[in-house]
Image: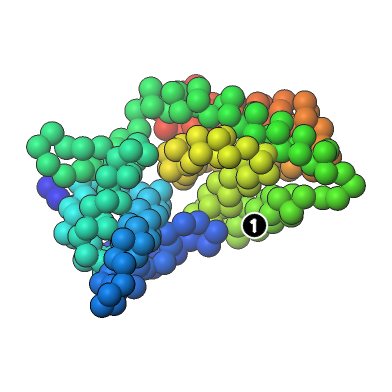
Amino acid sequence: MAYVAGSSAGRNGTRPGGPGGERATAPDRPAPGADARPERTSLSVRARDAVRQRIVDRRYPQGARLVEREVAEELRMSRVPVREALRALVGEGLLELLPHSGVRVRRLERSDVEHLYEVWEPLAVQASRLAARRVAGSAPVEPPGVIALRASLDRAEEAASDDEGTREVAAHTAFHEDIVALSGNPMLARTMEQLSGQLQLLFGMREEPQHMRAQHAVMFRYIAAGDEESAAASTLLHVRDSRAVALRSLFDDA
């Protein structure tokens, strides 16, 4: 049975700090004589971000079939950029191709979660180590990335206090992305980008205990102090705790 993308999904679905929260309403027809390719690329990116956001927010639930025409109607776009967006999200692992035609939101199995953490753990640890190294190397000047990291941490705490789970997930995701940005390693950033959507989905599905929010504050303190090894060690602890919480939340692990 097709998932009707034009129903309640996406009508009020903004998420501060997260991609794709706004409705994509710009016209997708270029002006006469204009090059349509850059505009189509931009629309494709906007469509990808919007669909990704709806998956992360579970407005498109796991296992739901997405119909290209219905998604295009909801986003008020033509089908071409939406088709490109859906293909991109298949590549990100958020959607999967159906045997005959179309796509559906991927269901996260236990093995998917374990594999994701196996890849994320060393990358997250190295990102924190490199971020701290960059801070130490720029002393006494504080890199702008530290300010962004502190702001993401503050937004997460504020969202938790307000009991706004979606906004908290966005802030936590931004916190980890800001660490990668602060690392200054573009190859690491490109690699992490491939995991971003799946991590956002996972963060949104599990609970977020207070002690894990406190771990972010510890990570930030060591990174801002330029302490590489302590930043790496605190990140390793955080990712392993995150894995345990995810498996317990999703699969009733003891």
Give the residue at the far right of this rendering.
140
Say which residue appears at 50% left-offset and 34% top-offset. Answer: 191
| Residue ranking furthest to the bottom | 32
Q: Position of residue 43 (x, y in %)?
A: 34, 62
Left or right for 69, reference 225: left
Please tell me how crowded label 1 is: few (under 14), some (14-19), or many (20+) other residues with Cα within 10 Å: many
- The one nearer the camera, 140 or 237, is 140
Can residue 1 be seen in the rendering of this structure? yes
Residue 142's place in the image compared with 46, above or below, is above
Q: Is residue 47 visible?
A: no
> Is residue 221 shown above or below 243?
below
The spot of residue 193 in percent (x, y) is 49, 41
Q: Which residue is painted at 50% across and 22% down in the image?
A: 118
Residue 142 shown left or right of residue 73 in the figure: right
Indicate the quadrant where residue 29 lies. Answer: bottom left
View extreme (front): residue: 33
Residue at point 53% right, 49% down? 169
- The answer to which quarter of the image holds residue 225 is top right
The residue at which mark 1 appears reads as 155
The answer to whether 76 appears left or right of 120 in the picture is: left
Which image quadrant is residue 6 in? bottom left
User: Label 1 is placed on what type of residue?
Assistant: Arg
Q: Is residue 129 above or below residue 199?
A: above
- Judging from the image, what secondary structure is the residue with disc 1 in? helix
Numbered circles on residues, count = 1
